[in-house]
Image (cartoon, rainbow, N blue to C red):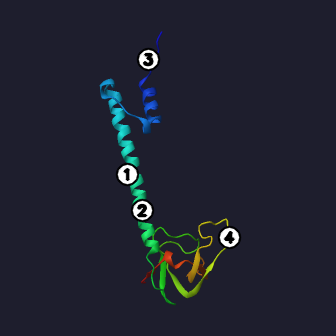
Amino acid sequence: MLHKESSSSKFLTLFKNKKNFEHNESNLDENDLLKSIWLKKLQESDTSKIASKTDLLQKRYNSFINTNHFETGMLVSWKAGLRNQSGLRYNQLGIVLEKLTIPIFDTTNVRRASDFKEPFDIIIAFLDEDNNFTTFFANSRRLQPCSE
């Protein structure tokens, strides 16, 4: 007795092999055709997501390399998508305490790879959740000037 493959198992097979899936419409019944259309849409969605990520990466890169001039007393905040330290949150203001002429490179904290050997060229102060005046070193390429 031959066992006919169920629609759900055909679908599962198609789904698992969606990257390599090529179909011949003449060999497909209506349900299989609908599944193949769905899989094609899924592939297009994946491609769209990759394009979106690529655009976002390019946007973040351009923001990172676009430098600003900072002076003591200026209000600053993180540029969108460039925060890599705790403390100052997005949309929270900090104030420039000092712009260093020679950057400091943090080589002590290898575990936090997000800022390992990053040039810290600015000292920022902000009010923490207890309203304490807190300072930290940052990479000025990740910051933007703000108004009140």
Circles 2 and 4: CB distance less than 8 Å? no
Q: Nearer the viewer, residue 22 or 88?
A: 22
Badge 2 element: helix
The Cα atoms of the two marked residues, 2 and 4, are separated by 28 Å
Read off the residue under disc 4.
109
Query: What's the residue type where badge 4 is placed?
Result: Asn
Q: Which mark is residue 48?
A: 1
Tag in front: 3 or 1: 1
- For mark 2, does the 10 Å Cα neighbourhood hold few (<14), some (14 to 19), or many (20 or more) residues? few
The first of marks 1 and 4 along the sequence is 1
The first of marks 2 and 4 along the sequence is 2
Residue at screen point 43% across, 39% down: 19
The Cα atoms of the two marked residues, 3 and 2, are separated by 47 Å
Read off the residue under disc 3.
4
Taking 43 as reference, is 68 above or below it? below
Q: Position of residue 89 (x, y in %)?
A: 53, 72
- For mark 4, does the 10 Å Cα neighbourhood hold few (<14), some (14 to 19), or many (20 or more) residues? few
The first of marks 3 and 1 along the sequence is 3
Residue 132 visible (yes or no): no
The Cα atoms of the two marked residues, 1 and 2, are separated by 12 Å
Badge 1 element: helix
Read off the residue under disc 2.
56
The first of marks 1 and 2 along the sequence is 1
Residue 40 visible (yes or no): yes
The first of marks 3 and 2 along the sequence is 3
Circles 3 and 1: CB distance less than 8 Å? no
Q: Position of residue 120 (x, y in %)?
A: 58, 79
Taking 41 as reference, is 36 above or below it? above
